[in-house]
Structure formats: structure tokens, C-alpha cells
Image: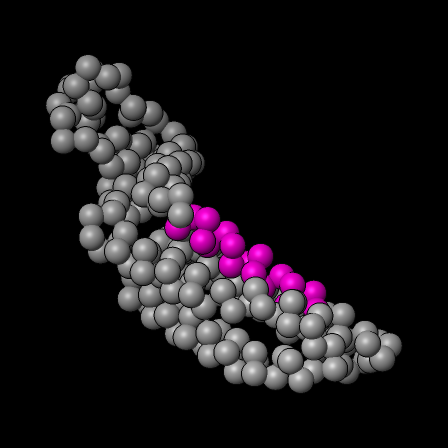
Amino acid sequence: MRGLTRLGEPETTRAGSGGTESEATMAGVSRKSTMEDVPRWADLAARLVPLTVLPTVLWQSAMGFTDGPSWMLTPYVLVLSLVVELLAFLTLGLVRPWGEVFPRWIPFAGGRNVPTLFAVSVASLGAVAVTFAGAVGALGWADAPQGITMTLCYLPFLAWGPLLAIVTVHYLLRRTRGGHSISESLAGSKPTGNGSSVENDSPAFTFRTMR
């Protein structure tokens, strides 16, 4: 049996049942590669997005109880607030491994590479939509009965669109111009047919015969 090893390093070929060890190795390599390729400013921008939406979400949720709980209005507002926060949280996918490879629990797409054009298109449309919504909504903040309080809660919302646009541009450049995508990282640690994993992430490697 032949394995690929780096020159001067011990072999990393290990036998495993069901490929469990191989999958764990690939997941570790994928996460490490993505996180190393994301600069601190892009990671910070992505982390800020859910926080910019949080005051708005809290305000909307409170409005659902203004005149007491309503069997129709209250659930609608709470669900809407949850959906908005979830959409904001998806921005983190642009700087995380699950933004390049679909998580395995997703039916039919699990484990497959996320198409760059698909991710960028969705994120770009989202950035335009939330920027437009924030700009239009800002026109009516001052005239609202709760003017100052409402303005303070909705003001951070205006940063969602620009932050998302910045992170989206970085995501596009990282996956198309020199950044290491997860698919490239996985090429350096491939499972063999018998559940083994072979490391081959460096141009300096040699063939070594294992007897």
C-alpha cells in the first residue's frame, strides 16, 4: 500500500472504519483554512451585522405587546423579528466554512460546495434590499409617536446593508482571487477507498512504500 507523506514528516495515513477519521480530518482542515484566509476586519464586520439588527428586533418584539398580547399581531411580530435576526446571522456564513460547503444536515446539498455565484448573488440582493428598506423606513422615524426612541432603535439597522456588501465583496475576492477555498483544502486531505485519509497539502512530498 502506498501513501503520500511530507518529506521528513511521519505518515498521516491511518486506517479507520466508515471514514469517520477522514471526515473529521477534512472538517478540521476546512475550518482552519477558511478562518486563516479571513482577515480580522471582515470577520468583525460579519459579527457586527446581527448586533446592528438586534435593537430593531427588540423594538419590534416590544411593539407586539403595546396594547397587550394579541392572538394575531403578537405571533406575527415575534416571528418576523426572529426571521430578521436569522437573516442577519447568515452573514457569518460569508466568513465561516459553512458558507463554502453546505452543512451535511441539509438535504440533497449537504457536503457539496456552495456555488460562489449563488452565494454572492443572494448576499448582494440582500444588501440592496435591507439598504433600501432602511432608507425608506428612516423617512418616517421622526414622525412616529415614539420618535426619538424608535430612531435610536432603528438607526443601527442602516449599517446592515453596507456591512453585508463589504463582507460579500471580500467573500467573492477570497474565493476567486488567490484565497484558498475549502474545496482546495479538501484536496489536500482525501479519504481513500478503505476509510483512510491521505494528507497531500504541500508540493514537497514523496512516495513512500508501506510494507
Q: Quadrant of the image for the C terminus? A: top left
Q: Of all residues shown, which one is farthest toward the right?
A: 68
Whether residue 23 is visible: no
Q: Is residue 86 above or below residue 182?
A: below
Q: Position of residue 53 (x, y in %)?
A: 58, 64
Q: Quadrant of residue 63?
A: bottom right
Residue nearest the viewer, comparing 130 with 107: 130
Report the predominant secondary structure element of the magenta stretch.
Answer: helix
Q: Quadrant of residue 176?
A: bottom left
Q: Position of residue 161 (x, y in %)?
A: 45, 68
Q: Left or right: where does residue 194 sit relative to residue 68?
A: left
Q: Position of residue 150 (x, y in %)?
A: 68, 73
Q: Residue at the spot x=26%, y=31% of the render?
A: 198
Q: Which residues are magenta?
A: 42-60
- Reply yes or no: does residue 49 show up in magenta: yes
Whether residue 209 is visible: yes
Q: Left or right: where does residue 29 sit relative to residue 45?
A: left
Q: Is residue 96 above or below residue 86?
A: above
Number of numbered discs: 0
Q: Residue at the spot x=32%, y=43% of the render?
A: 37
Q: Residue at the spot x=29%, y=25% of the render?
A: 13
**Looking at the image, what colour scheme do you see?**
one colour
Q: Residue at the spot x=24%, y=17% of the render?
A: 9
Residue nearest the viewer, comparing 164 with 6: 164
Residue nearest the viewer, comparing 144 with 91: 144
Q: Position of residue 54 (x, y in %)?
A: 62, 61
Q: Quadrant of the image for the N terminus? A: top left
- Reply yes or no: does residue 98 show up in magenta: no
Q: Is residue 118 above or below residue 72?
A: above
